[in-house]
Image (tube, rainbow, N blue to C red):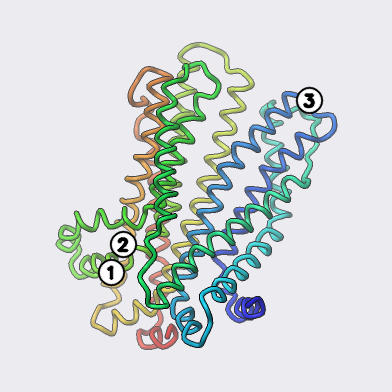
Amino acid sequence: MFALAVRSIAQRPGRLIATLVSAFLGSVIIMAFNSMHDTAGGANVDARSSDTLTVAASVVGGYGTLLVFFAIASTLTVNVRQRGEEIALLRRTGATPAQIKRMVVFEAAAVGVIGTLLAIVPATIGGEQLLNVFQDTDQVAGGVEYVFGPIGLSAGFGVGLIASIGASFLAVRRATREAAGGPESAGRARHFAGFAALVVGVGAVCSTFALDKTDTALMAAPAYGAILISVGFAVFSPVLLKFPLGRLARPITALTGASGYLTVHNMRQRAAQLSGVLMPLILFIGMAAVTLYMQSLQNDALDASGITRSVDDKSLETLNFVIVGIIVAFACVMLINTLYAATTYRSREFGQQRLAGATPGQVLGMVAVESVVLTVTGVFFGTVAALAGTTAFSVVRVDAVLPGQGPGIWLAIVGIGAAATIVTSVGTACRVLRTPAVEAVELAA
């Protein structure tokens, strides 16, 4: 199966481009931040600089690992689902489920290794620039030299390979069962993981009320709680996507006509496939909103008290803004990456709809309405997760249920997520629809 996996990659490398992009960008983030551990352990590094670098590596390393796993999982899930006919053909020709799993896992592992190797040079450059940011804000001594060593390198390979192999195994396991004609997996492990993330997330948010407003770790509990709640929602995204369809089916059809009719019926059938887009969207909204609002609230509280910001305050502020910048860039790229891969694959579906009587405009309208439904669903649940962490932090820090920063930050975050979702989906569909319907069906067959 290893030889078959190698030939499969060589014959159709474009099929794994989305996974390669996820592994590459994820490894850049993981290695760049974990190289701060290597730098902190270098010669002539004072205690304050070492603490700052270690905290940055530890905090963002946790964020990064979570993001990388979900990014690779979403793109691999899309990839494996697109290969349903290929997997069914292999089963009919005598391949066992275990052999197919090994083939797909070998492919994912190879792509993970390639992505990590390509990420070494960019990660080195990014880590050095990150150190410059800390030095420019006087959080790290100017004489500290950048070191890219075994910790950063091993973290990149470890996380990339574990995420690739684990996500591919879970995705192909379900696909082989469906190809065999058996009942779909109940997804007990997935559901357990989702419930566990929600329970632990709620517990972390509630633990905020046990802290004092002056505690240095006050922002950690609600932030991690909101992130875990976002993860829980992302795990249950196939179920969450059916919620607006059940409530808004008639209004969507009435407002958008034939495009809305196609959207409702299509999304009911493809809820599991489209849910892959909700993962990065929910994580993006939840993580970015809770981090930015808490940091803005913290800054306003310090300014109102007249207390001069300490080095630790500046370090935390810089770290949070760096985290948000990485979240925005990485989550948007992954969202675009997943949407592009999923929409491009639908050329045959679009061709069949056009041969059945739908106009290109109606098909394009269907994609646009789908994007709006996905955006509204992702924004709603991402906002719920962010609101949980932000409210807990606001009550403890300033004795107010809601922060006084207004909706500006939220609107900016939602605008970025909505633009990435709608523009990518519609733009890719426009390109796909340029192919004649008959040719699209023949090419995809």
Left/right placement of residue 251 relative to residue 403 reads left
Q: Is the residue marked by circle 1 packed among few (<14), some (14-19), or many (20+) residues within 10 Å? A: some
Q: Residues within 10 Å of mark 2 (few under 14, many from 20)?
A: many
Residue 217, position in %: x, y?
A: 54, 24
Give SS at disc 1. Answer: helix
Q: Nearer the viewer, residue 134 or 182?
A: 182
Residue 207 lies in what quarter of the image?
A: top left
* Closer mark to the observer between disc 1 and disc 2: 1
Up the image or down, 217 lies above or below 148; here it is above
Q: Which mark is residue 370?
A: 2
CB contact under 8 Å: marks 1 and 2: yes
Residue at left offset 36%, top offset 41%? 383
Percent position (x, y) of residue 112? 64, 62
The residue pinned by badge 1 equals: 266
Is residue 270 or residue 106 the one in the foreground? 106
Image point (68%, 40%), residue name: 130
Q: Tell me how far mark 1 sits from mark 3, CA to CA.
A: 60 Å
Q: Closer to the N terminus: mark 1 or mark 3? A: 3
Quadrant showing the C terminus: bottom left
Indicate the position of residue 413 as horizontal and vertical percent values.
42, 43
Q: Is residue 236 above or below residue 402?
A: below
- As helix, strand or loop, the secondary structure at mark 3 comes to loop
Q: Residue at x 44, y 86 (%)?
A: 443
Query: Which residue matches tag 3?
Result: 46
Q: Is residue 188 left or right of residue 365?
A: right
